[in-house]
Amino acid sequence: MRIARVTFGDFLYVLMIGLIFLVPHQIPAGFSLALLVLALSRGIGLIRLAAEARLLARGKKTTVHVIREFALSTIACLGLIIVAASILAGDKNAPVLLVLVVAALLASASWSELTAKERWGRQD
């Protein structure tokens, strides 16, 4: 269930980034604030899920396994914070970096599916 939450969360994260771009006549401060709020909310959710995963593992998983499970989502979160700060600082080319953030999120969602198949031996 946790893997499904992370995967679905990553897809919703991509959707929310796209919706932020659809708001007309945005000023850079409002745009970067929206991206920052999105990144911080996702980051808090990832921290909560990682802590839950570590507690539920009780020795079955090492910290490295938990980090690997959440690595790409966390990198995307940090990337979004960097993009938001760059936009706020006046860098007009910073939104181009969102391509990397979205790519990391989609890769994370694919990796989560792969992890689920490996774990339960599913052959979908």
Image: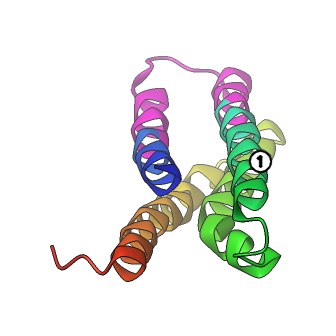
Question: Bounds of the magenta span?
Answer: 13-37
- Can you say whether 86 is above or below 21 in the image? below
Please state which amino acid type lies under the numbered disc 1: Ile
Between residue 90 and residue 15, name the one nearer to us.
15
**What quarter of the picture does the C terminus occupy?**
bottom left
Q: Name the residue under label 1.
A: 47
Asked which quadrant contains residue 85, the reply is top right
Judge whether residue 21 is colored magenta. Answer: yes
Give the residue drawn at x 73%, y 71%.
67
Would residue 67 appear left or right of 38 to someone viewing this image? right
Residue 45 placement: quadrant: top right
Viewer can see residue 107: yes
Residue 44 at what x, y percent from top left?
Answer: 76, 38
| Of 78 and 33, the residue lying toward us | 78
Vertical order, 72 against 79 (above or below): below
Specify whether residue 83 is painted magenta.
no
